[in-house]
Image (cartoon, rainbow, N blue to C red):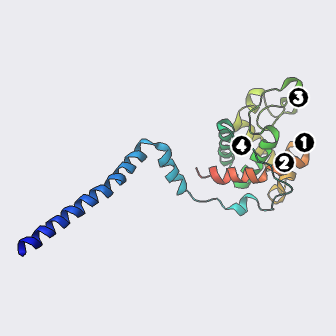
């Protein structure tokens, strides 16, 4: 009788060890996969980043219908460059939203060179700034950091820009022929800032 109990106990322990080994196997494998796939590790880190307060991003609500475009890697990189330059300028998330919405309207976040016959001025870069209007040289305004800092310098000079609708703040800096068109990009700009501000 004692031999039977001991045999059952030994088999039970062996079974637990075997089951534990199977359960531990995938967990160990998953850990190894994380180590060999930096993107998976980055996703985990990004999931732990502090969330951006959405009320800071669109404090006045959006105006009119919103537009959205799919972004390629270059456009996403330009959005990240705008966010980095905004931080460098010591400005907040709202300034980044205004900047990205402006660049979405002006260039669809593409760092454009001179467009030739399609453009009767000398506007270039993410914000379609003009060397002839004093924004800087062609090399400067086609540098995303410089162009953003130049835009933000103009935004800082607008009294009460934080309390204005996005389109009015952007228009005061840009002096566009289509002043209301900036508003349509506010939601996508806010989404980009929310996603990349703390990444």
Q: CB atoms at circles 2 and 4 under 8 Å apart?
A: no
Identify the residue shown where x is 52% and y is 50%. 43
Of the numbered discs 2 and 4, the one sitting upstream in the chain is 4
Q: Distance between the residues labelled 3 and 4?
A: 24 Å
> In what element is the residue under mark 2?
helix
Of the numbered discs 1 and 4, the one sitting upstream in the chain is 4
Q: CB atoms at circles 1 and 4 under 8 Å apart?
A: no
| Residue 97, image x, y percentages | 74, 51
Q: How far apart are marks 2 and 1 (CA)?
A: 10 Å
| Residue wearing tag 4 | 70
Number of marks: 4
> In what element is the residue under mark 4?
loop
> In what element is the residue under mark 1?
loop
| Residue wearing tag 1 | 176
Identify the residue shown where x is 77% and y is 62%. 59
| Residue 98, image x, y percentages | 77, 50
> In what element is the residue under mark 3?
loop
Of the numbered discs 2 and 1, the one sitting upstream in the chain is 1
| Residue wearing tag 3 | 119
């Amino acid at each position: 009788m004692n031999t039977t109990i001991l045999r059952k106990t030994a088999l039970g322990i062996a079974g637990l060890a075997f089951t534990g080994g199977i359960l531990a196997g995938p967990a160990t494998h998953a850990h190894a996969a994380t180590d060999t796939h930096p993107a998976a590790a980055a996703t985990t880190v990004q999931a732990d980043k502090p969330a951006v307060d959405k009320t800071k991003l669109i404090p006045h609500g959006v105006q009119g219908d919103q537009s959205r475009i799919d972004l390629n890697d270059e456009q996403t990189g330009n959005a990240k460059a705008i966010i980095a330059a905004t931080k460098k300028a010591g400005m907040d998330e709202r300034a980044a939203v205004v900047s990205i919405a402006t660049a979405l309207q002006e260039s669809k976040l593409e760092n454009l060179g001179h467009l030739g016959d399609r453009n009767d001025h000398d506007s270039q870069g993410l914000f379609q700034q003009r060397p002839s209007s004093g924004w800087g040289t062609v090399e400067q305004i086609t540098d995303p950091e410089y162009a953003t800092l130049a835009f933000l310098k103009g935004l800082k000079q607008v009294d009460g820009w934080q309390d204005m609708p996005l389109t009015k703040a952007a228009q005061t800096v840009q002096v566009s022929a289509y002043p209301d068109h900036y508003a349509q990009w506010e939601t996508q700009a806010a989404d980009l800032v929310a996603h990349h501000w703390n990444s």
